[in-house]
Amino acid sequence: MSEITYSRQGDYLIPDLTLPTEPELPLGRYALMHRDYLEKHKRVTYLNLLTSGRLNGHLHEVEQTALQRLELLTKQLSAEQGVTEELKEKAPMQWVGLMNNIRSQAEEVILTELIYK
């Protein structure tokens, strides 16, 4: 266990405390949304992750999971609803509309199950 050092501030000794360094990881949209949610609604969890140096790792993992789940759900919903490459060639505007709806459905699941949990 490391020894705590102090700095004199006038008549007081203040402990020299720093947060553990975390590796820099790319944080995308879902990671940032989850961080904001934790900070506002799960304050203890947020502070525990932050002070233990595991916040960025946790957020990066949530981001990767969300992106994988989005891709999987989009494929599954497309297959279920019959949105194919053939439809894309025959009726591109209809295909775009259907794919936008599918992506919105998949994203709603991700937000509910991963981000705001």
Image: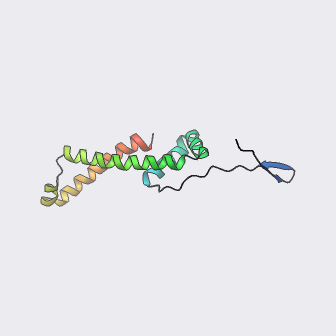
What residue appears at the point 12 percent right and 59 percent down from the top-left corner?
90
Colouring scheme, one of rainbow, by chain, secondary structure, one colour: rainbow
Q: Tell me how many marks there are.
A: 0
Q: On screen, 6 above or below 41? A: below
Q: On screen, 28 above or below 114? A: below
What residue appears at the point 48 percent right and 48 percent down from the top-left corner?
59
- Residue 40 lies in quadrant: top right
On the rendered image, what quadrant is the C terminus found in?
top left
Position of 34 with respect to 83 (left or right) is right
Q: Position of residue 106 (x, y in %)?
A: 31, 46
What residue appears at the point 62 percent right and 49 percent down from the top-left corner?
20
Q: Nearer the viewer, residue 28 or 91?
A: 28
Farthest residue in the front direction? 1
Q: Position of residue 53 (x, y in %)?
A: 58, 47
Farthest residue in the right direction? 11
Q: Position of residue 86 (x, y in %)?
A: 13, 56
On the rendered image, what quadrant is the N terminus found in?
top right
Position of 12 with respect to 42 (left or right) is right
What residue appears at the point 39 percent right and 40 percent down from the top-left corner?
113
Q: Nearer the viewer, residue 82 or 71?
A: 71
Q: Position of residue 115 (x, y in %)?
A: 43, 44
Position of 53 with respect to 61 (left or right) is right
